[in-house]
Amino acid sequence: MEIFYTVMLLIIATVTANMVYPHFPLIPQAFYQIFAGMLLSMLPIYNHFTLEPEMFMLIIIAPLMFHDGQNIDTHELRKHISSTMSMSVLLAIITVIIMGYISHAIIPSIPLALTFALSAIVTPTDSVAVSSITNNVEMPENVMGMLERESLFNDASGLVAFSLALGAFTTGTFSIGLGINNFLFVFFGGLLIGLILGILLIWLRIRLVRNGMDSTSVIVPFDIISPFAIYLIAEHFGCSGILAVVAAGVLRSAFSKQIRLSNTSLQLVSRSTWNIVTSILNGFVFVLLGVSIPTVLYDIKKDSMPDLPKYILLSILLYIVMIGLRYVWVKFSFANIHSKAHDHNKNAIISALSGIHGTITLSMAFSIPFTLNNAPFPYRNAIVFISTVIIILSLLIPAIVLPMILPNNEVDIDPDEFNKCKRQTVHYATKKLIENNPIQQTDAHIVAATLSSQYSNRRPSNKKFRKIMREANAVEINSIQKLVDENKLNVQIANRYVRGLVWQAQRNRQFSFYIVIFAIKHLNHLIARKFKNNYHYKTNYNNQKQAFQKVENYGYESVMQFLSKDHNDEDQMAINAVKHSYNFRHKRLNDNGSADKQNELFIQAFQYEYNYVQEQSGLGNIDSTMAEELYKQISIDQLIYMQQNTDGREK
């Protein structure tokens, strides 16, 4: 039960921090999560909390890196592969070597192998932390792309370098040749295993979909457990599990077209599930950091209080050295980020400051053993403390400096203008839907009415609703009268149907009259039950029902044509309510299993909305910011519909 309470409290802390952040967005979200973790550390269950590195890497880092890999732009990765490797491998190795010697020079009592281990711990960058810190500023796309690509691979560089340095210290021996061979085996072995398993899992997923096993209850869990399986297999063979999940994720991105052959609802549910999972795991990282800080402070005070100023000074110096190395690397184009000449220096500064540390650094620091040869591991608390200070500095400095040199990315959009564009978008989509589906007019009208509910969440006034309903009834009655005049409809059937419409109208106006009609209907129902075995009664009833359905279909189409004409925006809510009333009646009387047809029309309508926004944006009638907001709204509407449809099918 203790594990259950621990996880639940971490989730609650993460969600609480995420709830507070929108109210005070000037402070990056990561700091709220760290603070929530520090509050958790006051509970007895978290006293002297220590992170389990292996579980942390498996449960949190593996799915996050897999998700980052499958969302990377493979075209951009191929285009910038040399710069990516330069930043994530070559720069990482040089940083470890330089900072290792600097650390040993400042604190000679720490063995050189351990200073290399410390340098390897603080070298990897974290794109998740970058996104959290830069959420309120407009990062240059080329810089952000470089940071995302770099973080995919430099984690493995840091882990391998850390493993070599720690092994050299614990065994007392180190061979350059053996170290290089081990590095190549772990690095490229992880990539190879990831590619092999990635191909196997993609093939298996496609086979499941093609064999009809494409329900969310099968495919979504399959996708979620994939990174855990890949990581464990790669680690079992002594290779980098992190690089394996990254390679498999990148491969999924490359085969995204084949994977997207599954139905749209599955794609949307899978995407939303991954977003939820990664959002919680990202929050876990910083909450765990907050939970760990009091333990780190307690340990360092207990063992190394006299050396505390020296450790803080070393932390600051190492952070400055890392910023300087990153600046030089980008400034002199050892890693080309394709900046324009006048932006090159600024982008180099941004790239240097954005080398934020988080998940992997925290994990490696806590993975140092507690004991060595039955004695406390030397300088463990010092290394963990220095790593924690560097993480905090790498979060704090960019949070202060970047908003000073980058524009704010918050864009104010006039709600009235947005609602106007939204109405125009939906109107265009529904109009095109009805025009292009003459054979499926009924289903098209039902879909159009549902989409029109996007106009507003307010309820229409009863006065306007009754007015438009009376007009719709009049249109329906006139259309039926036209059939009678043209001798296409029996007068008795027409009279009985029209009387039903009048009763319906009266029912909407007077509750007492509705009670009378309700009693008459149920009396007729009792009579029908009494004569249910009468063949002639059954035949007449069925014939009458078919005749009524034909009349209703004709009247329904006439009313929908009337309601689909251009009206004032003020009347649109009432029109939508009348459409809903007619659709409900029509669906009840004509239950012909048209759900699949409507699903296809919904997808078609959403595509019309996308086309309209794209067309108007290209013509310059709406700006790019408005277009982006409209795209987001269409995606949300589509996601909600698809999820509801999926839930309905599974039930």
Image (cartoon, helix red, strand yellow):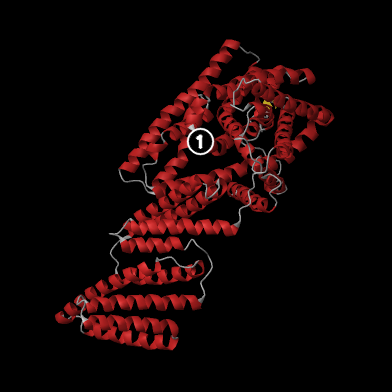
- Give the tally of numbered discs: 1
Give the percent coordinates (x, y) of residue 258.
37, 37
| Residue 107 visible | no
> Does residue 419 appear left or right of residue 579 in this picture?
right
Quadrant in the rendering for residue 158? top right
Give the percent coordinates (x, y) of residue 441.
31, 62
Residue appearing at x 51%, y 31% in the figure:
246
Query: Quadrant location of the C terminus?
Result: bottom left
Which of 394 and 204 lies nearest the eye of the viewer?
A: 394
Give the percent coordinates (x, y) of residue 624.
55, 45
Crowding around mark 1 (Cα neighbors within 10 Å: few <14, some 14 to 19, many 20+) is: many
Residue appearing at x 44%, y 70% in the figure:
575
Give the percent coordinates (x, y) of residue 17.
66, 50
Which of 195 and 308 lies nearest the eye of the viewer?
A: 195
**Label 1 belongs to which residue?**
66
> Does residue 243 appear left or right of residue 256 in this picture?
right
Which of 70 and 335 lies nearest the eye of the viewer?
A: 335
> Does residue 126 appear left or right of residue 529 in this picture?
right
Residue type, label 1: Phe
> Does residue 438 appear left or right of residue 390 in this picture?
left
Looking at the image, residue 180 lies above or below residue 289? above
- Name the secondary structure under disc 1: helix
| Residue 543 visible | yes
Spot the residue most to the right. 306
Residue appearing at x 49%, y 48% in the figure:
272
Which of 142 and 178 lies nearest the eye of the viewer?
A: 142
